[in-house]
Amino acid sequence: MERGQAKRVGEVATLNVMIHKPSFWDLSLAELREHLATMHLPEYRARQLGRWAYRRLAESYEEMTDLPASLRTRLAAELPMVTALAVAEQCSGDGSTRKVLLRLADGNTVESVLMQYDPTDAGRGRETVCVSTQVGCAMGCTFCATGQQGFLRNLSAGEITQQVLHFARELKAKGRQVTNIVFMGMGEPLANYGALIKAIEILRSSDGFGIGARRMTISTVGMVPMMRRLAAEGLQVGLAVSLHTPDDALRKQLVPTARFSVAEILAAADDYTAATGRRYTVEYALIEQSNDTPELADRLATLLKGRNCHVNLIPVNPTANPETRRSSRQRVLEFERILQAAGINTTVRVEKG
């Protein structure tokens, strides 16, 4: 066996041994304090570990040089920092987008994406991380590669936050930092509600990663009860609703698991805006000769008139499903024109490779 192969096998073996132990990354700061108390360690150690992990972006206890060596050894044995391993990466032609495949402790993999935006007259440059919340997805959207893959399991809070930390470490080496987080990767975020909220709390905590909730956005296919539960949390995270059509029958074809009507979903989104004061986004994946007709654009405009929302038109990405072809540029622009003419705030998503 070659040295590189032996190293990878050794990594997998180490992960498999550690998988059944509690992971450092899965603990909120409050839970970390409680866990350290059971180890008879003082409370200040939790703040110390939090700063190392989330501010200095340490990947192991060995990097925490102001901890006694004996304590680092003990923590590694009792509360391992099992970090997801990058096993593949793709980069766009212009270098502004990088997609990484991360291998988790049980061997499953998830995708995360870093999207870098240059400064414009309207605002500063952004370093946005798109994270997954599940391995696979149970929603079954016909135009989505993950939806066609099926659902395997939910991610833990630590597995969610590690995706952000992976890119944060890369950016730190270049003197930059993560500015925005979107929960729009693999899976339906609101179907993994507990882990999602814990991850948000870790990422926004002043003792944790320290990024503001207003710089995070959650995308949902329209899980109405969970949307209302999120509104009651009092968080200032953004909300994006994957609507894709104003027509309930067509939506059922595009999203076979859809349980709620378009009217119910938009009502819940309106209530979210009322509770948080934040405008929501309507995401609309445009599919050739399916949901991209002028008639549907007119119906969508009528439906959204007077609502505090923004429409994000997304020419669908090609998948293994031959029935979901990307709308032509002409049809995309016509759909946008109809909405804008009706006074609906609309943009076409910037292609990021």
Image: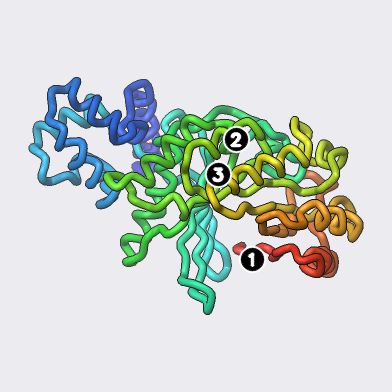
Report the mark closest to the observer, 1 or 2: 2
**Mark sitting earlier along the chain (2/3):** 2
Q: CA distance from mark 2 to mark 3?
A: 10 Å
Badge 2 crowding class, 10 Å Cα cut-off, few under 14, some 14 to 19, many 20 or more, is: some
Asked if 248 appears above or below 20 in the picture, the reply is below
**Is 5 displayed left or right of 196 in the figure?**
left
Looking at the rendered structure, the kind of residue marked 2 is Arg
Residue 315 appears in which quarter of the rendering? bottom right
- Circle 1 residue: 350
Most extreme residue toward the bottom, as rendered? 121
| Mark 1: secondary structure | loop
**Mark sitting earlier along the chain (1/2):** 2
Report the mark closest to the observer, 2 or 3: 3
| Mark 3: secondary structure | helix
- Circle 2 residue: 228
Q: CA distance from mark 3 to mark 1?
A: 29 Å
Q: Quadrant of the N terminus?
A: top left
Residue 219 appears in which quarter of the rendering? top right
**Mark sitting earlier along the chain (3/1):** 3
Residue 228: x and y, percent?
Answer: 60, 35
- Circle 3 residue: 275
Badge 3 crowding class, 10 Å Cα cut-off, few under 14, some 14 to 19, many 20 or more, is: some
The reply to whether residue 114 is visible in this rendering is yes
Looking at the rendered structure, the kind of residue marked 3 is Ala
Residue at image position (84%, 52%) is: 291
Residue 75 appears in which quarter of the rendering? top left
| Mark 2: secondary structure | helix
Q: CA distance from mark 1 to mark 2?
A: 30 Å
Residue at image position (33%, 29%) is: 23
Looking at the rendered structure, the kind of residue marked 1 is Val
Residue at image position (52%, 53%) is: 113
